[in-house]
Image (cartoon, helix red, strand yellow):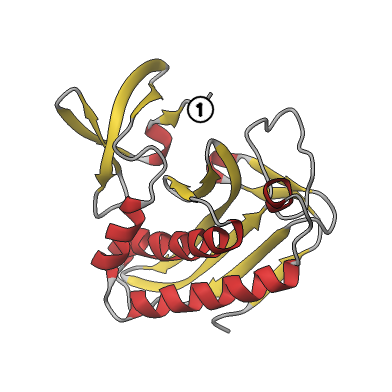
Amino acid sequence: MEGTVILAVDQYAGRGQSGKVWQSQHGKNLTLSLLLMPAFLNPSQQFDLNVAISLALREVLAQILKQPVLIKWPNDLYVKNKKIGGMLIENILQGSHWKYSVIGIGLNVNQAAFPEAVPNACSIKQLLHQDYNIQDLLSDLCKAIEGQYLQLKAGNQAKQKDLYCQHIFGMNECRKFKIDGICVEGEIIGVNRYGRLILDFNGHITDFGFQEIEFLIS
């Protein structure tokens, strides 16, 4: 049924982008899967769903933390240079028909320390210096996702994409990236309709898919 939410108390082998593993301490964080059926979208509009869910996550975290929360393209959430959460969307298509989507979400809530292997992680507790109620977070998150999903269904993709671009991590900043093993500097100037990241390299404009470019964050 659309809107079904499955919570995980423990997460030892959660899936992330490019096969990365998401680990979570017992009962400390919010990890869930959400079932949606966006049949009103064309399969070519898959990134529009990504935008809507990313905006919902960013909105809730910004309200809680009272400081800027940015979307590290395509779908991680960052506070300053530290990752506080992310998501992975699996879309199931049948020909030209969009059957359903499973949205996996992980937010660092009350975890106070992280393994050395993930030095750029942070949590709500670390930023607020106190525990946060996970059930309240879940409730607020579901409301925000519903709101953005209804906006998407109403055909407000252009407005959502503009808002997404306003909150991209590194937007209009000179940043270091790795492309084919080579370190380069460029400026993010947006994303195209298919969700490819658009960069400006000293006047040379090009776009990249997720596995074609890597952020270098110090």
- Evaluate whether residue 132 shows in this view: yes
**Residue located at (85% from left, 54% from top):** 26
73 relative to 94, above or below: above
Side of 75 where 191 appears, left or right: left
- Evaluate whether residue 36 shows in this view: no
Quarter of the rendering occupied by the N terminus = bottom right
Q: How many marks?
A: 1
**Residue located at (44% from left, 62% from top):** 55
Of 205 and 129, which appears nearest the observer? 129
Expressed as whole percent of the image width and height from the top left, the position of residue 184 reads 34, 18
Side of 20 where 135 appears, left or right: right
Q: Quadrant of residue 43?
A: bottom left
Badge 1 marks a residue whose secondary structure is loop
Which residue lies most toward the right here?
Answer: 26
Q: Which residue is mark 1?
A: 217
Side of 155 where 107 appears, left or right: right
Q: Quadrant of residue 209?
A: top left
202 relative to 65, above or below: above
**Residue located at (48% from left, 66% from top):** 56
Expressed as whole percent of the image width and height from the top left, the position of residue 145 reads 50, 72
Q: Amino acid at mark 1?
A: Ile
